[in-house]
Image (spheres, rainbow, N blue to C red):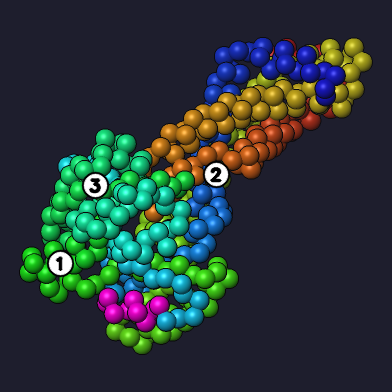
Amino acid sequence: MLQHFPLIWKNSVRNKRRSLLTIVSIAASLCLLAVLGVLYHVFFLADAAPEQAQRLIVRNKVSLTNPLPLSYREKIKQVPGVAEVMIYQWFGGTYIDPSNFFARAAIEPEKLLNVYSEYKVPDDQWKAFVADRSGCLLGRKTAERYNLKIGDRVPLIGDIFPVNLTFTVRAIYDAYRDNENLLFHFEYLNESMRTSGQIGRSDLVGTYVIRMTGPEHAASISRAIDDMFRNAPLPTKTETERAFEVSFLAFIGNVKLFMMVISAAITFTILLVAANTMAMSVRERLREVGVLKTLGFTQGGVLSILMGEAIVISLLGGGIGLGLAGLLCRGLSGLPSTFVDMTRFTLTPAVAAGCMAVALVIGVVSSFVPAWNASRRNILEALRVTD
């Protein structure tokens, strides 16, 4: 096939309009397929970061919206293999406008850096945050997005919790991931609930974050905690931080099945487009097949030339589609992260190789039948064709 590449290339772009439309169709489809592949990889296949592997999340077994008692904290800490337990209470709320979305949560400041060792904060800022009960710790990405600096005031209008809180930015942290949060003192939220008359909603926690002595203890710690509260009025569910993130996808259904069905539909559509293009191209050039055989081309040579044209078009479309997918993933990686780290939305070599393999298979499958039929025609039969 390689020795005939100049002829294959010339024939591939001979009908420029049809070739261009086919390439564009394949590129658009492969672009979507690549983005779906990246999403699938990030959601289900990507390994947890080393720091993530050290953490477990404890929540209510029935629903994340049902809180757990504050008294669970000390009991959890007694489980062998648990190095630290920290409150993590999602606050939500609105910062100026509902479109300003980033994670806002109440934590225990004195435990934060022990649990989230990847957070880097200047010492003076850290001390100021710990000392100020109404202070907040802000991720640098969010601080830059909203032009917030040390000493600025950040008002939050409550929604989940019926209180409005105002914070002073006391510290800004850096992290290679998850650097978009606004974190504040749990005691500030707890006291605000009491003073606003919501005593029944105080001393309740949405989740506990556990740092283990080692990731190898994850299964035993999870089992021990859940067994401890199995018969309690509020049973627990303990899982790795990675599993906790992925569990949010269940809110929109069977995401794995959706992605697989959509990917199969895209692949089948591309195959139909490429097969239709190849069938028309071969039908128009049956006389040329006779000429090629007259010049000494074998059946295998004719077959490789015709199939090579489809493969070239498919690979061109696949390459362009991967370029577009890379740009889309770069745009997605800049979106705010909440439960999924958006910075991991990059076109990996494995996904790119998979998509190019799909393009190659589509080129081969779509062209084989018409090319095989055309290559088997004898010289006289092929030269009689007048279409």
* For residue 364, above or below residue 88: above
Q: Which residue is mark 3?
A: 169
Cα separation, mark 2 vs mark 1, equals 46 Å
Question: Where in the figure is residue 98, as x and y percent of width and height?
Answer: 21, 44
Q: Which residue is mark 1?
A: 191
Q: Earlier in the sequence, mark 2 or mark 3?
A: 2
Evaluate if marks 2 and 1 touch, with contact meaning CB atoms under 8 Å apart.
no
Q: Is residue 198 left or right of residue 10?
A: left
Figure quadrant of residue 34: top right
Q: Nearer the viewer, mark 1 or mark 3?
A: 3
Q: Is residue 328 left or right of residue 23?
A: left
Question: Where in the figure is residue 293, as x and y percent of width and height?
Answer: 88, 17
Report the residue at 56% width, 55% height from top. Answer: 47
Q: Earlier in the sequence, mark 1 or mark 3?
A: 3
Is residue 74 inside the magenta stretch? yes
Cα separation, mark 1 vs mark 3, equals 20 Å
Which region of the structure is painted magenta?
69-77
Q: Which residue is mark 2?
A: 37
Figure quadrant of residue 266: top right
Q: Nearer the viewer, mark 2 or mark 3?
A: 3
* For residue 108, above or below residue 183: below
Which label number is shown at residue 140?
none
Report the residue at 52% width, 71% height from top. Answer: 213
Report the residue at 51% width, 29% height from top. Answer: 324
Is residue 73 inside the magenta stretch? yes
Residue type, numbered disc 3: Val
Secondary structure that dominates the magenta span = helix
Evaluate if marks 1 and 3 touch, with contact meaning CB atoms under 8 Å apart.
no
